[in-house]
Amino acid sequence: MSSGTKVVNLDQQDRSATRPQRPAPPGPLKPTRARRRPALIALGLALVALSVLGSVYLTTSLGQTYQVLAVTDEVARGSVITPGNITTVNLPTGPTALKPISADEFDLVKDRIATTDLKAGQLITRDSFAEELQPAAGQSIVGVALAPNQMPTNLPKSGDSVRIVETPATGGEPPVEAPFSIPATVVSTQPSSLGDQTVVDVQVESKNAAALAARAATGRVALVIDAVGAG
């Protein structure tokens, strides 16, 4: 090798030694394992199970019906519901707001009195009939509108035995003798469309109906509950 060649080689070696070394390229990343969350897995399985159960329920319930009672023709209020007035119809099973009488309670309905006008095809409910119409002979029903301070906080219910007591005028002195009162039985209770009053329908003897109606019209009455459900 010539001296000129040696000089060149040494010069290349010097430059190679002073040249900065490039870092080695990074190696391939190791795959990371996804964490398993048992709670999420269990929740997912539960949702799948519920979906399957719901599908099975819908599949089995669709198309199923049950028999209820309906009227075949018009029955006027106060008329007897005869066996010829009653028929059975099929209703689909499942939640419903309807509460008709089941077909196996036929004997409960026949020969009862219609409490309202029934149309042909109308379903029969427990409010559609009774053993007798109210009020019975010798009885009358009077509506009494009462403010909260004219009756107990526990609202009277159907069947409660009560007394409607006459009260003095506002600011007046209480009576010296026992105030006028009429025994009655509660028929129904419902809110009034006038303010915070409650209308209580009470059944009284017919001979007391006029006196009670006249006093109720003045607003100077109060209701006293004597016995719950004893009427």
Image: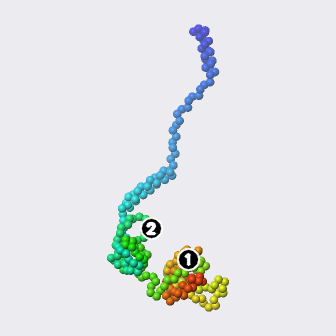
The kind of residue on which mark 1 rests is Thr
Q: Residue at x 39, y 57 (%)?
A: 56
Q: Residue at x 55, y 32 (%)?
A: 26
212 horizontally vs 15: left or right? left
* Rendered location of residue 209, percent (x, y): 51, 86
The kind of residue on which mark 2 rests is Ala
Pair 2/1: label in front:
1
The residue identified by callout 1 is 198
Q: Secondary structure at mark 2?
A: loop
The residue identified by callout 2 is 97
Q: CA distance from mark 2 to mark 1?
A: 27 Å
Q: Is residue 21 above or below residue 183?
A: above
Q: Can residue 45 be seen from the camera position used here?
A: yes
* Rendered location of residue 156, percent (x, y): 54, 79
Give the crowd class for mark 1: few <14, some 14-19, many >=20 residues within 10 Å. many
Q: Residue at x 44, y 67 (%)?
A: 97
Q: Quadrant of the N terminus?
A: top right
* Rendered location of residue 53, percent (x, y): 42, 57
